[in-house]
Amino acid sequence: MRVDTPVAELLFHEEDATPFNTDVATLKTWIQALACLESAPKCWLSTVAPDGRPHAAPVMVVLVDGAPCIASRPNSRKSRNLARNPRAVITVSGDDLDLVVSADAHQVSGGAALRQVAAAFATKYDWTFTIRDDRVWDESLPGSPQYAFYVVSPVRAFGYGPDGLTATRWRFNST
């Protein structure tokens, strides 16, 4: 699940219209972006519906080995969308950074990986999952509903400063 360190670059260049900032000293680090994700109580996940329209839903996000992970019920619209098309976007607004992460999301499998994600949810949200037969259950809810974990692997990301004039683009190896 590990995410490689991306290349950070200015989103706006000298030829772009003023008033955008083109000072490389304003670049945000990927560590700052991860801190924004980690500190957020929730983010927004956008997926692609079968008719091609975007679908957005609030999700709780945890980091596992530097990769954002979410939980979703397998029959939810977002899970069904991701089963059809793994392309997704996570957005979050923080005090120092507004973040947009374009990604591919894939279901986490295997007992060890599932336990690792479950532990991250327990630590951040005190949300406890049970892993049984390589499946995820929330036994604290009536009917013990099943969940799926997804790792959201960034393809590219954009961070916007609080002034609205500074922006960083992160490009990952796959782009």
Image: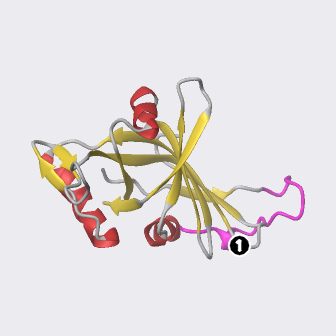
Identify whether 76 is placed above or below 5: above
**Going 77% across and 67% down the picture, which residue do you hit?**
164
Q: Name the element at disc 1.
A: loop
Measured as percent of width and height from the top left, residue 154 is found at: 47, 48
Name the spot of residue 34 as percent of width and height, x first: 46, 66
- Give the labeled residue for mark 1: 162
Look at the image and say whether residue 34 sits in the magenta stretch.
Answer: no
| Residue in view at x 24 percent, y 59 percent | 118
Q: Main secondary structure of the magenta part?
A: loop
Residue 51 screen position, x and y as percent? 58, 23
- Using the image as rendered, state which of residue 38 and residue 148 is in the foreground: 148
Quarter holding residue 63:
bottom left
- Tell me: 173 left or right of 156: left
- Left or right? Give the position of 27 relative to 32: right
Q: Indicate whether residue 25 is drawn in magenta.
A: yes
Residue 39, image x and y in percent? 46, 72
| Amino acid found under the numbered disc labelled 1 | Pro
Magenta region: 13-29
Q: Is residue 152 above or below residue 92?
A: above
Residue farthest along the left direction in this orientation: 133
